[in-house]
């Protein structure tokens, strides 16, 4: 998922649920914040189309790492693995 800056206030361990039918986020037990991601060095390493569905990182260093067709990342963005793409 791309540029979910409206979720930038999340803290480690906070869980959310995304309903793709309604396109809305809600508190639940479906998403897990893995921590911070450096988009300039891809640290920790994020592999295209590989991950555990419902996990995400919050970007703390902006960069241009290409992850599943998105290569523009700003501080505070979220990179979320949907189960098939980031």
Image: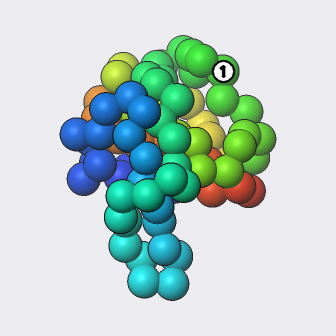
Mark 1 falls on what kind of element? loop
Q: Is residue 33 above or below residue 25?
A: above
Q: Residue 4: where, in percent of width, then height?
A: 35, 52
Q: Residue at x 29, y 39 (%)?
A: 10
Pick whichever, 46 or 70, lies toward us: 46
Q: Residue at x 66, y 29 (%)?
A: 46
Q: Residue furthest bottom?
A: 21
According to the image, label 1 marks what residue?
Answer: 45
Q: Residue 61: where, in percent of width, then height?
A: 36, 20
Q: Is residue 18 above or below residue 83?
A: below
Q: Residue 49: where, in percent of width, then height?
A: 75, 46
The total number of labels drawn is 1
- Residue 6 placement, left or right of 20: left
Colour scheme:
rainbow
Residue 13 visible (yes or no): yes
Q: Residue at x 24, y 53 (%)?
A: 6
Pick whichever, 33 or 81, lies toward us: 33
Pick whichever, 67 or 85, lies toward us: 85
- Residue 11 placement, left or right of 34: left
């Amino acid at each position: 998922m791309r540029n979910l800056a409206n979720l930038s206030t999340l803290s480690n361990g906070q869980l959310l649920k995304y309903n793709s039918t309604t396109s809305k986020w809600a508190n639940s037990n479906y998403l897990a914040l893995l921590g911070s991601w450096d988009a300039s060095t891809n640290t920790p390493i994020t592999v295209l189309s590989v991950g555990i569905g419902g996990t995400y990182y919050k970007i703390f260093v902006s960069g241009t790492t290409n992850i599943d067709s998105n290569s523009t990342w700003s501080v505070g963005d979220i990179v979320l693995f949907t189960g098939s793409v980031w």
